[in-house]
């Protein structure tokens, strides 16, 4: 066992776990003051629920291998390895590791991906979702959507030449590249966010400028925590402290920095002012875009991708006004669009595989098939799950609660206590 790589994987897992509270701050600052507790609880609820499901059976689905005698299902598509339920086999390996690091360290790392993917969706339904309904959705969605998609993308075996020889159909059958989760995390969550925005409908008074962020510093703090954690997200996906991890690390600095510049440039040209929320959103858009491509681009190309993502995502956030879906905190504009841009960009300029270097459209086609397959699957299942919940237990709070702010009604708490008698 390599103790250095073990430490690297465990530290990366801790960094990625920090991203979910960071996301809670990022989202919490952008809603109204009377909904901030509700907004943040959607992230913390995801952390609790998905953490439990991952140990119980999530890993058993996401990393089931058809070659195992305890596997049941269709290899590379959907199945479960019963020996992984409750992580029994992984605990045995941790006591006597057979690889460079205990499998349990990788289990922990991948758990944090599952948690934040679910939490990302919540930004699309800010200010109007029931907490209980959200938790039901999160559990079903993780089981039917995230865990299988993670198998398609993250579950693979390499040969001695580092070629994929077995695994989920997106990486093994069509050969798409997704180093850290552009498809499994961001396109997946963005498509689900779009579906839920349709299910829950528009907030009252939906229009441009409907809601200004109630606490800009809170959102900037969330951005900082997200960016910090993202180094574990991307570099940690190499699961080794080596040169590839170093490349992923520098690209995770370069792309969002460039994306921030691209976003605020668009703001300046369109509105005459570059805002701090725009800078924060631009950084996140760049982080999203570089996620699948962080090990496939040179730093210069990473910055090109960043600028492109910043500009396109800044323009894409206005699509909700054109098409009439209320994606409250721009999950679609940032995560769905940014994930698609980053995934397809590999097909154009990816080192050794892109159209620019090889003259072949093969990789671009593989990237497109992977991206849009996940988009379609996630959107369709999310729409079905969301409508089922809305028609049974109800997904949206009462109109009067939404207008007043849902913190006290749903959670019996307030984010801010004003007045001398309450301090």
Image (cartoon, grey):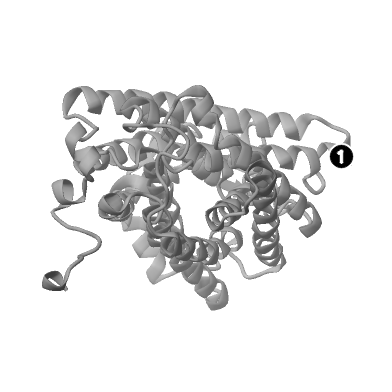
Specify the quadrant that holds the C terminus. bottom left
Residue drawn at (29%, 23%) of the image? 387
Pick the front one: 156 or 368: 368
Image location (x, y in percent) of residue 166? 59, 41
Residue at (19%, 29%) from the top-left corner? 394
From this viewpoint, is residue 49 visible?
no
Residue nearer the viewer, 30 or 74? 30
- Give the residue at x 66% y 39%: 312
* Residue 11 visible in the shown view: yes
Left or right, 400 with reference to 194: left
- The image position of residue 42, as x and y in percent, is 30, 49
Relative height, residue 173 to residue 70 (above, below): above
Q: Residues within 10 Å of mark 1 (few under 14, many from 20)?
A: some
Q: Residue furthest left?
A: 421
Observer-nearest residue: 286 or 245? Answer: 286
Question: Is 340 drawn above or below residue 256 in the view shown?
Answer: above
Nearest to the observer: residue 256 or residue 162: 256
- Residue that carries the numbered disc 1 in the rendered image: 356
Instruction: Specify whether 393 is left or right of 101.
Output: left
Residue appearing at x 28%, y 41% in the figure: 139
In the rendered image, the residue lying farthest to the bottom is: 3
Query: Does 162 sit left or right of 96 as displayed?
Result: right
Task: Find residue 392 and report its horizontal and vertical position in percent.
Answer: 17, 25
């Amino acid at each position: 066992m390599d103790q250095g790589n073990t430490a690297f994987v465990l530290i990366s897992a801790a960094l990625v776990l920090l991203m979910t509270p960071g996301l809670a701050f990022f989202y919490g600052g952008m809603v109204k003051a009377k909904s901030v507790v509700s907004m943040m609880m959607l992230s913390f609820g995801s952390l609790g629920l998905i953490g439990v499901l991952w140990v119980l059976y999530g890993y058993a689905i996401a990393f089931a291998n058809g070659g195992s005698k305890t596997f049941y299902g269709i290899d590379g598509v959907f199945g479960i390895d019963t020996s992984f339920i409750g992580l029994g086999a992984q605990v045995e390996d941790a006591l006597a590791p057979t690889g460079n690091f205990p499998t349990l360290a990788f289990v922990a790392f991948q758990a944090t991906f599952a948690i934040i993917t679910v939490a990302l969706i919540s930004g699309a339904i800010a200010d109007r979702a029931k907490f209980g309904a959200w938790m039901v959705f999160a559990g079903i969605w993780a089981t039917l959507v995230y865990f299988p998609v993670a198998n398609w993308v993250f579950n693979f075996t390499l040969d001695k030449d580092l070629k994929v020889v077995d695994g989920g159909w997106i990486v093994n059958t069509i050969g798409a590249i997704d180093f850290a989760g552009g498809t499994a995390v961001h396109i997946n969550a963005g498509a689900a966010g779009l579906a839920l925005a349709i299910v829950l409908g528009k907030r009252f008074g939906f229009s441009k400028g409907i809601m200004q962020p109630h606490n800009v510093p809170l959102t900037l703090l969330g951005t900082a925590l997200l960016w910090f954690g993202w180094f574990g997200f991307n570099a940690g996906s190499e699961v080794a402290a080596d040169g590839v991890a170093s490349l992923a690390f520098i690209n995770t600095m370069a792309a969002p920095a460039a994306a921030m510049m691209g976003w605020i440039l668009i703001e300046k040209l369109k509105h005459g002012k570059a805002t701090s929320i725009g800078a924060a959103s631009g950084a996140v858009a760049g982080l999203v875009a570089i996620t699948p491509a962080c090990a496939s681009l040179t730093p210069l190309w990473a910055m090109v991708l960043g600028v492109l993502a910043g500009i396109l995502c800044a323009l894409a956030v206005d699509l909700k006004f054109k098409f009439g879906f209320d994606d409250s905190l721009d999950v679609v504009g940032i995560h769905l669009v940014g994930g698609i841009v980053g995934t397809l960009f590999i097909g154009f300029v990816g080192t050794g595989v892109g159209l620019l270097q090889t003259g072949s459209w093969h990789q671009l086609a593989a990237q497109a098939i992977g991206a849009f397959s996940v988009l379609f699957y996630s959107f369709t299942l999310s729409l079905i799950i969301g409508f089922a919940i809305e028609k049974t237990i109800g997904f949206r709070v009462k109109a009067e609660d939404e207008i007043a702010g849902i913190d006290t009604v749903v959670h019996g708490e307030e984010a801010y206590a004003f007045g001398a008698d309450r301090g």
